[in-house]
Image: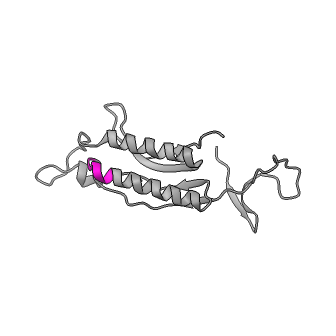
Amino acid sequence: MGRAVTRHQGDGARLAGEPQPGGDAQFAPGVSRALRLAVAQSTVPEDPGDRTAIRAAGAEVRALMREAAEAGARLVQFPEGALVYPHKRVVATGPDGTGVPADWTGAAWDVLREEAQRIAALAGELELWTVFGSLHPLTPPRRILTGRAVTTRPAPA
């Protein structure tokens, strides 16, 4: 169960229930209780089969990660579907223009996986927590999971 985040003037964010300044909290020397975060908006392609657009989106995400890290962020949050967020007509429109069951056979799953791996590797290199949404194929006959947030943990020191 998550804990609520509250703000204290001049003190940054603190988890609710955390000891107040001057309390009996013990922190290791040099450990900061502050967390600088960045919120980033990348260009999101709509066609899950457009390999070039997905690669470009991945490159943009990584550039924004570098920018966030250079600004001192320890966590960067991207939108749902940061690599691709299909418009329903791209995967669920028949040749005559009518709605049909979604067809994901043209999705570039390999490119999505490669870009997610490149983002994860850079997150480790930058020691930057990175949260981004992506498409994820589920085991048939289940449908595709969209907007799955993936958190990448920085490499251990």
Question: From this viewpoint, is residue 94 visible?
Answer: yes
Which residues fall within the magenta stretch? 49-54
Percent x, y of residue 43: 38, 60
Percent x, y of residue 157: 66, 40
Vertical side of 37 occupied by 101: above or below:
above
The figure's colour scheme reads one colour
106 vs 72, left or right, is left
Percent x, y of residue 88: 28, 53
Q: Residue at x 71, y 57 (%)?
A: 34
Question: From this viewpoint, is residue 146 visible?
Answer: no
Vertical side of 44 occupied by 136: above or below:
above
145 vs 150, left or right, is left
Percent x, y of residue 156: 64, 39
Q: Residue at x 49, y 43 (%)?
A: 120
Of residues 116 and 59, which is closer to you in this image?
A: 59
Vertical side of 111 occupied by 99: above or below:
below
Quarter assignment of residue 124: top right
Of residues 60 and 78, which is closer to you in this image?
A: 60
Q: Quadrant of the N terminus?
A: top right
Of residues 19 and 78, which is closer to you in this image?
A: 78
Magenta run includes residue 84: no
Residue at the far left in the pictured view: 96
Q: Residue at x 44, y 49 (%)?
A: 133
Q: How many marks?
A: 0
49 vs 153, left or right, is left
Main SS of residues in magenta: helix
Q: Residue at x 26, y 41 (%)?
A: 104
